[in-house]
Amino acid sequence: MAGASASPSAAAEQPAAFSFSITPAANAKGLPVSAEIGLKLDGAEVTAVTLAEAGGGKVSGTIRDDGTSWVPSSPLKYGKKYTATVTASKGGASATQTTTFTTMGEPGNRVGTGLYLFDGKTYGVAMPVVVEFHPGVPKKDRASVQKRMFVSTDPPQPGRGTGCPTARRPITARRSTGSRVRKSPRVSRWVGTRWAPGSMGTRTARRPRRSVSGSR
């Protein structure tokens, strides 16, 4: 009948609204250039992430395997304002969250790094990937440093990361003859060097992480 309201069954088909949260907190200041976009999804799935520098371009990145955050592909710039926009979906519904934050100023002191592998050289199949920090990473910061280190091999190989109670941080990746280990620039300026290697911790080497809109 013309003018009649929607039937109860039609109304029931509408997707239920949902909410999710992201970090950093809105208008946060003094964040490290290694800042990530934290995701608390409660069952939702991220469909797009955009991170843009004020007056600059967009930053590429990928979501961690466990879905807890979106990681920029390279360090952010010092003393710059960024805006992150995240869109997620759940049960047919879609929602978007936005946050703006500012990174810290350039530090006066930095921690240097060294790597015991070099481009174009040949190494044994059991050669560990060792990263050394100078003068060393304070104990309270080691977990954060390890979380932001990534190792990838071509072709992919299983691996395992360990840490020493000194400045040295060895990462071992078992590799067959002909495998290559790629260096990643993700934590370069964060630790005060031009580059640092890839994935650190007790996980095995993994396939590339899934990308969403705004990512590589």
Image (tube, grey):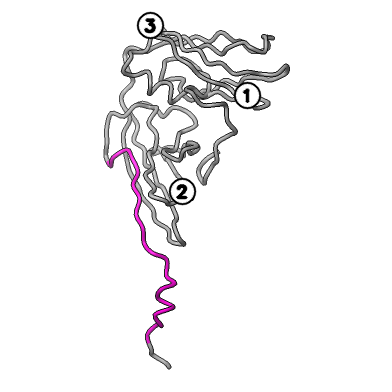
Residue 192, given in percent of the width and then of the height, sits at 42, 15
Residue 106, given in percent of the width and then of the height, sits at 33, 20
Query: Is residue 50 depicted above or below 34 in this figure?
Result: below
Q: Real-space Cα distance between discs 2 and 1?
A: 27 Å
Q: Which mark is residue 153?
A: 1
Q: Is residue 20 magenta?
A: yes
Magenta stretch bounds = 5-26
Q: Real-space Cα distance between discs 3 and 2?
A: 39 Å
Q: Residues within 10 Å of mark 1 (few under 14, many from 20)?
A: many
- Rendering quarter of residue 108: top left
Q: Is residue 182 magenta?
A: no
Q: Which residue is mark 3?
A: 135
Q: What residue do we see at 40% from left, 76% from top?
A: 11
Q: Amino acid at mark 1?
A: Thr
Q: Toward the viewer: 114 or 78?
A: 114
Q: Amino acid at mark 2?
A: Val
Whichever of labels 2 and 1 marks the residue nearer the N terminus, that label is 2
Q: Real-space Cα distance between discs 3 and 1?
A: 28 Å
Horizontal arrangement in the rendering, residue 87 relative to residue 158 (left or right): left
Q: Quadrant of the N terminus?
A: bottom left
Q: Residues within 10 Å of mark 3 (few under 14, many from 20)?
A: few
Q: Which mark is residue 46?
A: 2
Which type of secondary structure does the marked residue at label 1 adopt? strand
Which type of secondary structure does the marked residue at label 2 adopt? strand
Q: Amino acid at mark 3?
A: Pro
Q: What residue do we see at 33% from left, 14% from top?
A: 139
Q: Quadrant of the C terminus?
A: top right
Q: What residue do we see at 35% from left, 47% from top?
A: 98
Q: Which mark is residue 143?
A: none
Q: Toward the viewer: 107 or 155?
A: 155
Q: Main secondary structure of the magenta part?
A: loop
